[in-house]
Image (cartoon, helix red, strand yellow):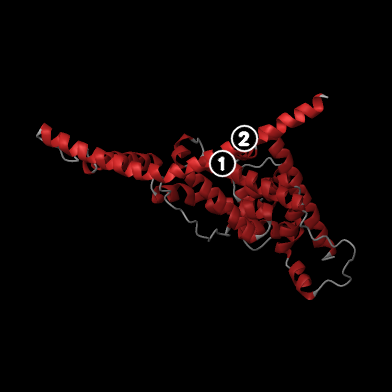
């Protein structure tokens, strides 16, 4: 398999891989690394690509697993900076401007969802995958995906309604 | 009515029952501009989805064509070099040391070289002759036996 052939296979979904990785890992750099890693793994196993039934779904699963590994190893390293001991009284101007922008509110809300719901929202509402594909990618049953999706959507709507009604906290 | 339809779709949407097509309809409605005031809060969500979809992966992936260098060929080359070495080595240091055709001449040469060897050997052996002096020395030590005789006589009594 030549590079161009490989790129033709990979190009349609490399952005999706990247966005899923970014949804999970938050940082852009981390997501780029993850995407690169996934694509390189595919490239190294290029001889087997023909055997995969659905390269795209396979890559998404790989991305998910890779990101989970990353998150786990980070927790193990205990590199979190937790500043729970103080609370900023007045939110800085930058933050206020950010929060006024309700679109970035959505990002915040999604970031607070559990990992699984995050992924499902990402795959369904942003990448427009159907339920069968999602359940294959995440190794879940079809109904479980629906339930999680419904929950995630309801949470987002509730939080959005709150901020809409009461304004920014 | 469109609004009615949208509200129904929203409910289905929240239950996770909408098809992709219906979701497209919703997305279309909420990103089109005019949204009913009581549905305003959905707007940022669908906008966010739309914006997010535009994010691209821009980093280059270094796809190296992995050159699988075959180490088998190294061993093959090594064996070839060894074989060549043996082949040329034996021909250079071959057993060709020169021969005599005439047996008499060969005998003469042989005895000459043997004579030389014995001569050298004898000179070597003669230098070792002073070892006889040591023998002489030890023989003179024989009188120590006399002391032994004397002590044995003493201790017997």
**Disc number at residue B137?**
1
Q: Kindly state the secondary structure of the residue where label 2 is placed.
A: helix
Q: Chain of mark 1?
A: B
Residue at the image point whose x is 50% and y is 36% from the top: A52
Residue furthest left in the image? B102
Q: Are marks 1 and 2 in contact (CB under 8 Å)?
A: no
Q: Residues within 10 Å of mark 2 (few under 14, many from 20)?
A: few
For residue A150, the mark is: none
Depth check: give the residue in front, B106 or A5.
B106
Instruction: Give whichever of A106, B11 is nearer the camera.
Output: A106
Above or below, comparing residue B110 to residue B1 in the picture = above
The reply, left or right, for residue B121 in relation to residue A145 is: left
Q: Which residue is drawn at the image coordinates 79% and 71% (left, top)?
A: A96
Question: How far from the left and from the top, in percent, is residue B44?
Answer: 70, 60
Q: Residues within 10 Å of mark 1 (few under 14, many from 20)?
A: few
Same subunit, tags 1 and 2: yes
Location of residue A45 in the rendering, given as x and y in whole percent from the top left corner:
48, 42
In the picture of the structure, the residue carrying the numbered disc 2 is B142
Q: CA distance from mark 1 to mark 2?
A: 9 Å
Location of residue B96 in the rendering, given as x and y in whole percent from the top left corner: 19, 39
Can you say whether A2 is above or below A109 in the image? above
Residue A6 visible in the displayed image: yes
Q: Chain of mark 2?
A: B
Residue B150: quadrant of the picture: top right
Inspect this view and state whether residue B87 appears: no
Mark before the other along the chain sequence, 1 or 2: 1
Front position in the image: A151 or A82: A82
What residue is drawn where x is 48% and y is 56%?
Answer: B62
Q: Residue at x 52, y 49 (%)?
A: A39
**The residue tagged with tag 1: helix, strand or loop?**
helix
Please state if A88 lies on the left or on the right of A151 as rendered.
Answer: right
Please, is residue B150 above or below residue B4 in the view? above
């Amino acid at each position: 398999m030549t590079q161009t052939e490989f790129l033709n296979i990979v190009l349609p979904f490399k952005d999706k891989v990247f966005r899923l990785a970014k949804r999970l890992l938050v940082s852009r750099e981390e997501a780029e690394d993850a995407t690169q890693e996934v694509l390189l793994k595919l490239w190294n196993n290029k001889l087997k690509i023909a055997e995969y039934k659905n390269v795209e779904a396979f890559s998404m699963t790989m991305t998910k697993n890779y990101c989970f590994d990353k998150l786990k190893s980070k927790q193990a390293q205990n590199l979190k900076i937790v500043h729970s001991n103080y609370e900023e009284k007045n939110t800085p101007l930058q933050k206020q401007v950010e929060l006024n922008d309700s679109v970035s509110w959505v990002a915040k809300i999604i970031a607070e969802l559990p990992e699984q719901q995050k992924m499902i929202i990402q795959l369904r509402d942003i990448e427009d995958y159907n339920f069968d594909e999602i359940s294959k990618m995440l190794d879940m049953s079809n109904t479980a995906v629906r339930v999680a999706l419904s929950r995630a959507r309801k949470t987002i709507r509730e939080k959005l309604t709150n901020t809409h009604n009461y304004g920014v906290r | 009515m469109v609004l009615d339809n949208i509200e129904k779709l929203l409910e289905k949407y929240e239950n996770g029952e909408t098809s992709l097509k219906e979701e497209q309809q919703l997305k279309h409605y909420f990103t089109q501009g005019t949204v009913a005031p009581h549905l305003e809060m959905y707007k940022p969500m669908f906008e966010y989805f739309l914006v997010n979809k535009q994010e691209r992966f821009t980093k280059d992936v270094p796809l190296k064509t992995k050159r699988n260098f075959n180490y088998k060929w190294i061993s093959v080359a090594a064996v070839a070099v060894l074989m060549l070495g043996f082949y040329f080595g034996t021909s250079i240091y071959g057993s060709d040391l020169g021969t005599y055709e005439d047996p008499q001449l060969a005998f003469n040469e042989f005895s000459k070289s043997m004579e030389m060897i014995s001569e050298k050997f004898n000179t070597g052996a003669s230098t070792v002759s002073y070892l006889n002096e040591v023998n002489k020395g030890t023989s003179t030590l024989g009188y120590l036996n006399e002391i032994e005789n004397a002590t044995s006589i003493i201790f017997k009594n």
